[in-house]
Structures are given as structure tokens and as C-alpha cells.
Amino acid sequence: MASLDAGLAVLAPSGELAAALFDSVERHHRAAGHEIWPTPCVRDFSSWLREQHQARLLRDASDLRVLQEVEERALWREIVAQEDAGAGLLDAAAAAGAARRARRIIIEYGIPLPEIAAAATDESRTLLAWIARFEQRCRELGCQSADQLLQSFAAAPQPLAWVESPAWHPAARRWLAAHARCMIHPAAAAVQDAVLCHSPSADAEIAAAAEWARVALAAQADFRAWICIADLPARRAEVIDAFDAALAPQRFRSDGVDGIARYAIAGGTPLAAFAPVRAALDALQISRGPVPFERFSAVLRSPQLQTDTADAGTAASLDLELRRAAASEMPLRAWLAIGARLLRERSLAPCAALTRIAAVFQRLEALRGAQPMSRWVALWTAAFEQGPWAGRRRWSSAEYQAAQRFSELLAALGAADALFGSLPRAAAERKLAAAAFDTPFQPQTGVAPIWISGSLGDPWLNYDGLWIAGMSAEAWPLPAAPAPLLPVPLQQRYGVPGASAAMQLATALDLQQRWRKRAGRAVFSLADSGEARSLLPSALLPRDLPPIGCAAPVLRPHWHAARQNAPPMEIWADTQAPPFADGERTRGVATLQAQSRCAFRGMAETRLRSDPLSRPAPGFNARERGSLMHAALERIWAALGDQAALRAQGESAEALLLERSIGEALEQLCAQRDPGARWRERERLRMRALLGRWLQLERRRADFSVERLEQSPQTARHAGLQFDCRIDRIDRLEDGARVIIDYKTGLASVDWRGERPDNPQLPMYALLQREDLVAVAYGQVNAAACRFVVESERDAVFDPRQRRSSLEEAPSLAALLGLWQSRIERLAEDFRAGHAAVAPTPRACRSCHLQGFCRIGIDAEDADEAAAAAHADA
């Protein structure tokens, strides 16, 4: 505070420490009752150097420009990819990062290039070649890297103070010692009370740290803690889960309330993960090339493209219509056209999301060919304002900050024309996406009471508590980790951190001494590995640390907390729906089929319309293939009329008949949804082969004529309800007897028997056409087998080898019809009365999608069988 009051700029070695210092100053002013105060001039060293260089450029434009972060990453990747030595690399991006880090170490630790050359290793020679090429490209571009900035300041441009820390690299330490007015040392805390937490798993260790913070905050309102988790970048999601459960349980509420958490995590997530940035990148991606339905659907329903809940509802309704009428993959222009058509045909309200997607597409189509990056950036910015960023007034603070950071990234790309040259649109967009994924971002929300860091370093400030995770004998001190590409002996000679085990040991001992001075109490923790073996605490820790308990979490930590805090639930089984009302409609045979399998399913599917969401499939889906087969067979028998005409057909005449019938069926269906010429041709060939096999089966039957084909539906009445039925075909035999045939393009079985038949379809058809009826049958028309599945009171109706069926022990089909009548009446009466008990037949759940609705619960084996059955049906 004295340094700031004296007008000095206070410099820290990292952005994380600078943020903590800045917040500490702000808290000091608030605690003193100040209402206004000067903005603290606390900066991390690298950012301060960039700011001072930018100010110097305003005074002297001849100074070299500094490469932006995104430019430097791209330049290193270009160099590594172009050099002969980089041609065979498995991961050129990682090699570019390693080369960049090695050059920074050379500059910061003063390692002479001749000494690297004298090492004469393949790695050192490759590194020097890359560095020479990088510096040459910098000269060609008239710029310099940020690593060279310090060398360009012969004097401090403003009065400085710097905080004492082991994190300073030697070049910065020497410069600051020569030019800063003073070094600020941290104050020591009270005597430390340390304990050891030994957890059974890594998840339990994180959960224990979160619970420790929760308990401490409950006991002391102004408690502040620094928690260090060394592998934080790899475990960020698990850490968020555990600390949300303990310190921000409101984030798990179903109403979407987020709120401010009492903890913050250092570092950041990729900028591309934030909603405004993700929506912008998605808008670019779908505007070129074929777009799968899943991708277009996600963008259409994106909250960033909706103005309000009404717009979101319209987008969801349009999405539902697209699932039924669209192909599985189309260019964006086709998606926009079919979306606009469906809005008109279904009389839906205007869809704001579709309008905004169209505006983005129109804007992007205005520029073609290879262009400088600055022109692409201007185009993208205008497109974002018309599309995913049009609803920015509803953004949260974090979303505003992410969009602002993304705009800065766009500006950096736009200023790099000399580096990127002219690029086609696809290449330019790939560079933008890569930059957004490579750029970490952390919204500024202030430093919370609980600060979680991934850096094993000195927290510098005093805290009420410290928690240091990962203190096992295997992990602490850290193992040696020399930088790639640089000779290890040189790294050890010049003191590069991590270059040897001895250096890591010294660093660990120094940090432990510092940690002892930073808080009144500390917890050192370790977790056993997943290999069922217990780890030992590090030998560097103080001996005989008192242990604290740690309970293992159940599943993930946040679900464990949610279960612990769940209110008591009252269980109430309601199996009775309201009686069927006059204005309601059944779904034909499907209603009684569902009611028979499970009364709850009958009510849910017919009365609640709980249909599964369909998804456009490549080509024709199973339902469409069934419709095509039905339509083609109807046309074939309308032309033939009887079996005699079929037998009289020659090979060429039959081929023409099949070609015409299939073509008309395809034309009719494709007027509603056309998957494209390739799929039409594939389906035509498949149907021609399959129908040829089916007609051979029909030729072997006893003589018959077709009395009736599928036309307008008939109405069946049971228990006072109406059920629309559409019978595929009725044949008249030579003696005047009649048979009913229903085509199945999937696997068919005898599924109409029993008190609760799996499918009462054929019994319902039979009750509509009782007169002279001697048999009912499924006609299975598929690649597995063409056959009849029969219930018949006669032999040889469909095949010379076919025998009379059991008729469920009834003496005749007429007697069986009476049994079917009573079953269907009972099912219809139960449905009409609102009977909705969750009581499935043994196999019903395998083809049902309502388990999450009815809560019946199936075990893993049943779930696997259900998935296999659904796959086989598809």
C-alpha cells in the first residue's frame, strides 16, 4: 500500500498473483470505509511490458511491433511445419510449442546460442534452425516477439516496485533489481497449524478440500483460503463439480439459477467453450459444405439465436417438423429453404433463429475466393452482429467478457495480414477456430474467498488457510522435467527450473518454508491411486502431522451432496387417468397395441402424445421403406387383380410392372421428403429384388383373386370408441372363402395371441371382415425372408406345406373371433376408463421409450436387450 500511495507501479511475476494483489488492495479500501479510490497499478510483468511498448509505439511509430499471442503461435507452427525436420513429426503443434518455450528459456536464462550449437545433438540443431527461421520471419514482417521486449527497455518507463518471489526468471530479476525502486517482501503469518488428509481416491481428496472450505466459511464469515491442486488443468471439471456441491449448490437447481460462487479457479477454459464464441463459430461452420441435421438442429435451437421464450418455442416446433420432412444432410441453403417452406405450410410463427442464420449465410456469401485475413475478420464481425450476437442484451457478465475477448482475438487476426497472406474462407475459419480453442479465458469476477490454483508456487499473500493437494511420496517433490529440445546439462548449468531432481528438491524445500509463513493453518493431502494400493505421504512433510478424516464420495461429489441435501420424498402411485373425453381421438390400432403391452404406455402415447423425437436418417428410414413397399404392392395388385394374371406375366412384363410401381411409389414419397438421387436409386434396386422374390412366393399359393386393397380407412368400434383401421389386402379364394393379409417389412411373428396380445392388429381387422373369413396372416417382405405368418382354420391356404394353426384351442376361426372380440373390448374399456397402471408385459419395455417417464426401472441386462432389440428393428 505504501508503494502504491507513493505512485509506484507494483509488478508481479504472474497474472494470477497480480489479480490476487489487486483484489487485496480493493478489499483494504473497502475495509477502510472508502467509497472511491485510485485504480491500483498492479500488473503482471509481461502484460506491463506490452502496455509500455504500446505506449512507446504511440510516440515512436518506427519501433518494431510486438507479435500478438495468436500470431506468435501461428508463426511457430508455420515454421515447424515447413522445415524439413518438422515434416515427419507426429504432432507439429506440440513441437512448435516446445520450440517456442525453449527460445523463451534461452532468453530468460541467458543461455548462449554457441553453447547450444556445441552440444551437437539432433534436437539442438533442429531447435537452432527453427529459431533462425523464426527470427528471419520476424525481420521480414517487421516485428518482434514478446520475449525480446525486456531487452529494448534501457530504463524503467515509470517508477516501479516488485514483489519478492521465486517465480521471477533471471533476466527479469536482474532488470528489476537495476531499475525498480524497491522490492516488496511478504509478511509472515502466525504460527502454522498443519494437518494431513489421506484420501482413498482423487475424487475423495477434492471433495474433502471442498467440504473443508465449506465448514471453515460457515464458522468464519471472512475466511479466506488458497487451495493448490497441481493437476488442475486435467481435473478442472471434477473440481468444479465438487466445489459447486459444497459452495454453490444453487447451480444444480432445475430453474437454471447460477449465482455467484464463493470460490474461483485460476487459469481458464478455452475461449471457444463460452456460449457467444461457440455460437459464432457454429454459425461459420454450418454456412459451408454439407450440414448434418444434428448440427443444424443444435444451431437452430441455440439460445444465442432466440429473442425470447416464444422464439425458442417456434424454433423447437420447426425442429420437430424438420425431423419428419428433411434429409439427414444438406447444404445450409437447402436447410433454409425447407425451413421457410415448413413455416408456411404448418402456419408457424416467424422463426427468429432461422432469419438470423439466413442473414449470416447471406453476409458470408458476399465474399468469395482467397482474401486477406482482415477482410475475413470484417465480414465475420458483421455476420456475428446480425446472427448469434443480435441478442447480446440478454448476456451475462461472463458472456459479455468472453465476446469482448473474442473480439480482441479477431482484431489480432485482422492485423496479421502480412503473416497469413490471402486465404480461402475455409482456411481462414480453421485458423480462427484454432485460435479460439488455443486461447484460455477466465471471466473477471473478483478473487473469491476460496482461491483454487494449479500452480505449485508461493501464494505470497497471507490466508486463513492453505490446502496443498498431491503431497504423496511419489509426487512430491516433483520429478525432474527438463524442457524438450534444449540440452539438459545446459539447463542444469543455467538453473532452468525442473532440469534435475536436485533442483526440484531445492524448490520443494523452499516452497514448504514459504507455505509455513502464509497461513495460520494448513492441510497437506494425498490420495491413493486407483490400483488398490495405499500411498505414503512425502518424506518432506513435517513428521507426525495429525490426520483429519476424509469420507469417500458416492459417484461424483456433487451428486453425493445433492443426495445428502435432498428433501424427503412422498411416494404416491396414481394409476388412474381421467376418463376418455369426447373431444379426444385414438391412434387406431396403435392405441390398443400400447394399452395391451402396458396401460401406462397406452395413455402416455395416445393421450399425452409422448412420442420419441425422430431423426432424419441417411436415405430412407424404416418407416419410409415400409410405406414404399406398401405403396408399390398396392399398385402391383391393382394392375394384376388376381393370381392368374401374375402367373401369365412374362419376365419382361413383370420387370416393367415392378419398375413402374416402384417408380410411382418413390415419386409419391419423395414429394414429401427426398433424400437425394443416390438414395432413390439404391432403394429402387433393393425393392426390385425384394418384390421379385415376394411375387415368386405369391405364385406358389392356391388360386386367389384380390378382393380389396389398402384404400380409405375403416372404422372399428369397441367400448364406445372409434379406431381407424387400414387393411392392406383381402383375398378371395377359389371357393369364395376370404383371407386378410397385412404386410410387414420387419421381422414378423405370431404376436396376436394371449389375454394381452403384443399386437391386436390382425384380430381387429378380422372382426371388421368376419364374413367367409378362414385365415389372417402377416406377409413378411424383407431381405431376411419372404414368408407368411398365419392363423388359419385350413391347410395349404398360403403354402402347400402350411397346416391348420392351433386357433388357441378354439374349434374354428369363427369361435376364435369371439375370444378376440372379448379381449379387444376389455382393452378398449380399460383405455376409455383411464386405466393407466405401469404393468408391462414381459417384453414390452424392450421397445418402449418411456422408462424415464413411468419410472419402472430396468436392470442393465434388460437395457442391453432392449437396445439390441431396437437395433434389430431398425
Image (cartoon, rainbow, N blue to C red):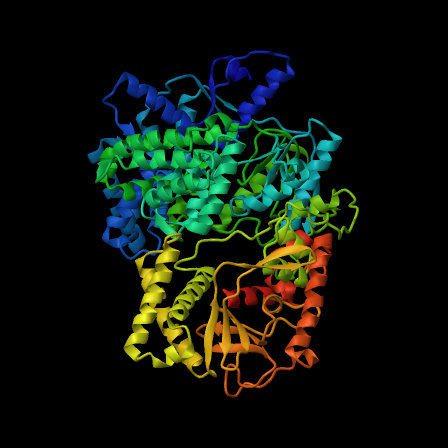
Residue 54 x, y percent position in the rendering: 33, 22
Residue in the picture at 74% in, 43% down:
566
Between 340 and 709, which is closer to the camera in this rendering? 709
Q: Quadrant of the N terminus?
A: top right
Q: Residue at x 70, y 44 (%)?
A: 561
Give whichever of 412, 504 is nearer the camera.
412
Question: Residue at horizontal 53%, vertical 85%?
Answer: 796
The residue closer to the viewer here, 720 or 358, is 720
* Residue 120 visible in the snapshot: yes
650 displayed left or right of 769: left
* x and y percentages locating residue 695 in the rendered image: 40, 77
Q: Is residue 426 above or below residue 671?
A: above
The answer to whether residue 851 is visible is no
Quarter-of-image position of residue 763 = bottom right
The single residue placed furthest to the front in the displayed view is 736
Instruction: Specify the quadrant of the image occupied by residue 356.
Output: top left
Where residue 651 sits: x, y (%)?
A: 30, 79
Image check: 557 left or right of 664? right
Answer above or below: position of 355 versus 825. above
Compared to residue 764, the image places residue 193 above or below, namely above
The extreme bottom residue here reads 801
